[in-house]
Structure formats: C-alpha cells, structure tokens
Image (cartoon, rainbow, N blue to C red):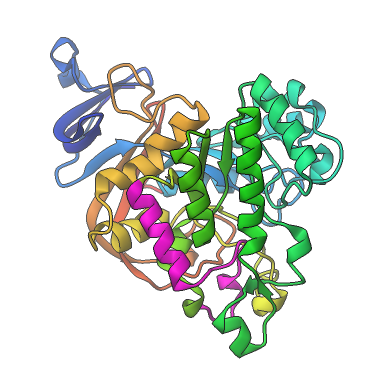
C-alpha cells in the first residue's frame, strides 16, 4: 500500500518544513517525489495544520508479559504505545521468567513476534535473575537480541559487580542501563524525603539513594570505557554529576520522565496515582531537570510506563505498588507544559522523544529522509482535550494527569508504513 501525506509540516534533519511525504513499501520519501507516482497513491491523507514527526521511541517501559499479564500484555502495551505516537519501545526485564538467559528471553520474543503492534526491542538483565548482587546474566548469549542490559526496578548493589558488567558490555558493544538505587539508604521509604513526607507522616526516600550510585557508576564508566545510560533521573545532584561527566568526555547519557518535569512533591495527593520510583522530588530538583533538558545534559525523555492492576494502585501512598502509566499522555503533557510555555522548542521535544533515543541505542530510524523506515507520527497540535484514563488502550489506568486539560493529540501512527493507530478508527 502507498500513502501520500499532503500539506503537512514535517520534521526533517533541517528542522520543520512544509512538505509532502510519500510512503511506499514501508519506506518514507520526501525529497524525490517528482520521480514517484505519488498521484496514484492508494490513500491520500490531508495533513493541513498537522505535524509529521519521526515516530517516538521509549527506551523505558514495562510491558509485564510474560509473568504479570493481569497488569498489562504486550498486545495492550503496544496498542497504548501506538495511541501515544510511539513506534518503538524497549521493555524492561522485570518479568517471569526473568530474561537473564536466552531460554527465558525467547519466551518474551515469541510473544512479541505474535502480538506486538509496534517495534519492541527488549532488554536483557545485568545480573542473573535480576538479583543485583551476584552472578552476571548470560550477556554474550543475549546481546544479539536485546537493546542493552539493565536490572531496572533494582540497582546493582556492588561496585565490583557493576565494573564486571561494564567490561563485558563494552566488549559486546552494548550499553549498561542503570536504575540507580542504593538499597542500604532506602529505610522503608516510598515518597521523597521532603516537606510532604514530614507533614503527612510518610517514610521518605533520600536523594542520595539515587545520586550515590550514579556517582559510583560514572567513575566505573570512565575506568572501563563502557557506554552508560542512567534511567529516570530525578535529583539535582544527579544532573550535576552527569553534566560534569559529559564535560570530561565520559560516555554517559541519561533520561528523565514527563512526571518529573511537570510535577513535584508539592503536588502529591494521598493516592496511589502519585506513587512511582524514583519518587516525585521537590521543586528545586524539578527545576534542575528542566535546566538539564535545556542544556543537553539530559538526552531523552522516557515514560517508565509501569502499569498495575486497579487493586494494586488503590492503597494510598504507603500501600500502593510503585509505578504509573505514561505512553498515552507523554506528548500532550510535554507539549502543553514545556513547549507552549516556551521552556523548550517543539524541535527540542522531538529530539528528546524521537531522534536521541534511537541514536544512542543504535535503533534504526529516527529521521524522515528518503529510504528510511516509515515510522511516523502525525499530530494535531491544536486539538484540545482532557486526559481520561477510561480511553486508554493500556490496562493500567493510574496516572497523576487524569482530568488535565492539554493540547496536542496523536491522530495517526505508522510502523514501516502500516497504520497501527488512527484517531478516527481506533
């Protein structure tokens, strides 16, 4: 099938341009249209007043399958991704079986092949059974089939083990992707150790539990030469450490989540929708994260989409499971609260959501150029709507953004030229 997208504003390597886009055989064409039979396209889509961007890539999601299909499945999670404009996602390995061996990973790969609606490139674990303390996973066996190695959900607890993992990952030309959390500093905490926790009698998680491991790992990355990527950073100190590491030329990148950029612990409510790990920090941390995306210290935005059952999220801040959903809310939240307020440009947001994740993780695409995979997202920036979890494709409904008024709606998502989401038919 061939499709012609007419009159759109297209994100090209030169920025946004008024262009037509032709899709044929799963590839995109923008510069050589005169030599193609575009007038004979099977379908013509009028994109007047819409933007066309490279499909978003989320390098940090939890699809819960195999093992926890009552929370989410690969089918529902990838449907949510498509509805949110994502054409490629990378699911974390906190599953059952844990993908620390090829046999276990194959279970996940088989389900992906059967049920995924967008591209899915999974992680392998760093440690065997994701225990964070002892033997490393079968990294050599896993490497050809995974985007990187991570124990996300837990931190690797010893420096010696992380150093060994980095040495092996470097030989395999794979990134180490770290959830940085020193368990010895948690002390049963579940929200940020700040004013809200103190005033409401909650146990807090100190910022040091995150930045202390980042500090350790940056030194190990410098020592080993391994590529190192930090998950969901949330503290001012972490931003400062990574900024200094980049200035020294250390091969380190990082991500943060939409919720850390627009919320702080001042926004907390006694509701599981506001509980995630790391927790919402204070306003100074949020402001440091914003400066980090402005100056390039923070390379990308990832949702940490972490669905749970309604029962698991109905136990308040103390008792609810950690994690919120984000695939279907990220773009409108970020567009409304960062771009429209002049904090960053739309071009910068697309770099953070589309270009940089693919480049860092070695994933194909991320640009709209002749011959590239037709992984595209079409957006109506002017469409105003209210975030309603009842409309989500995800099985998870827990979001702190329920009821928020936002602008910017995904109207179509294509994966290699195939329409995987369309607003009028979804």
Q: Is residue 314 left or right of residue 68?
A: left
Residue 369 x, y percent position in the rendering:
28, 22
**In the rendered image, the vertical position of residue 342 relative to residue 170, given as above or below:** below
Residue 385 x, y percent position in the rendering:
31, 65
Residue 109: quarter of image: top right
Q: Is residue 168 visible?
A: yes
**In the rendered image, the vertical position of residue 185 relative to residue 123, given as above or below:** below
Return the residue found at the far top. Answer: 35
Return the residue found at the far front. Answer: 248
Return the residue found at the far right. Answer: 134
Q: Is residue 89 left or right of residue 4?
A: right
Residue 44 x, y percent position in the rendering:
21, 31
Q: Is residue 273 magenta?
A: yes
Q: Is residue 421 visible?
A: no
Q: Nearer the viewer, residue 90 or 379?
A: 90
Q: Is residue 67 left or right of residue 314?
A: right
Q: Is residue 203 magenta?
A: no
**In the rendered image, the vertical position of residue 270 relative to residue 297, given as above or below:** below
Total residue callouts: 0
Q: Is residue 208 left or right of residue 118?
A: right
Q: Quadrant of the N terminus?
A: top left
Residue 316: quarter of image: bottom right
Residue in the picture at 47% in, 72% down: 264
Residue 220 x, y percent position in the rendering:
66, 37
Q: Nearer the viewer, residue 125 or 80?
A: 125
**In the rendered image, the vertical position of residue 388 relative to residue 230, given as above or below:** below
Residue in the picture at 68% in, 23% down: 143
Region rendered in magenta: 268-295
Residue in the picture at 23% in, 43% down: 51
């Amino acid at each position: 099938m061939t499709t012609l997208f007419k009159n759109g504003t297209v994100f090209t390597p030169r920025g946004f341009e008024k262009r037509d886009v032709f899709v044929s055989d799963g590839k995109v064409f923008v510069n050589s249209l005169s030599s193609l039979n575009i007038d004979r396209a099977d379908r013509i889509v009028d994109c007047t007043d819409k933007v066309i961007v490279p499909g978003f890539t989320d390098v940090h999601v939890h699809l819960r399958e195999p093992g926890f299909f009552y929370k989410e499945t690969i089918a529902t999670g990838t449907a949510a991704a498509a509805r949110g404009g994502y054409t490629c996602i990378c699911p974390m390995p906190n599953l059952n079986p844990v993908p620390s061996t090829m046999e276990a990973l194959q279970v996940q790969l088989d389900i992906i092949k059967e049920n995924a609606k967008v591209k899915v490139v999974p992680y392998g674990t760093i440690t065997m059974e994701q225990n964070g303390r002892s033997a490393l996973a079968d990294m050599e066996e896993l490497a050809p089939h995974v985007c990187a190695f991570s124990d996300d959900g837990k931190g690797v607890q010893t420096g010696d083990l992380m150093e060994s993992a980095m040495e092996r990952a470097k030989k395999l030309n794979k990134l180490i992707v770290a959830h940085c959390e020193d368990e010895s500093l948690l002390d049963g905490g579940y929200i940020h150790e700040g004013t809200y926790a103190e005033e409401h009698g909650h146990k807090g998680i100190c910022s040091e539990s995150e930045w202390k491991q980042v500090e350790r790992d940056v030194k190990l990355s410098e020592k080993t030469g391994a590529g190192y990527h930090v998950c969901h950073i949330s503290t001012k100190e972490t931003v400062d450490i990574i900024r200094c590491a980049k200035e020294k030329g250390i091969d380190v990148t990082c991500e943060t989540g939409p919720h850390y950029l627009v919320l702080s612990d001042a926004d907390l409510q006694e509701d599981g929708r506001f509980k995630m790990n790391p927790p919402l920090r204070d306003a100074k941390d949020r402001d440091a994260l914003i400066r980090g995306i402005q100056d390039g210290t923070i390379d990308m935005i990832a949702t940490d989409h972490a669905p749970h059952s309604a029962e698991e999220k109905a136990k308040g801040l103390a008792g609810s499971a950690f994690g919120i959903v984000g695939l279907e809310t990220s773009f409108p939240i970020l567009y409304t609260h960062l771009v429209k307020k002049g904090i960053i440009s739309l071009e910068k947001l697309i770099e953070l959501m589309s270009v940089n994740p693919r480049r860092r993780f070695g994933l194909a695409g991320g640009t709209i150029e002749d011959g590239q995979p037709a992984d595209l997202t079409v957006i109506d920036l002017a469409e105003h709507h209210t975030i309603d979890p009842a409309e989500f494709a995800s099985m998870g409904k827990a979001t702190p953004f329920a009821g928020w008024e936002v602008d910017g709606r995904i109207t179509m998502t294509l994966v290699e030229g195939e329409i995987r989401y369309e607003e009028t038919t979804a």
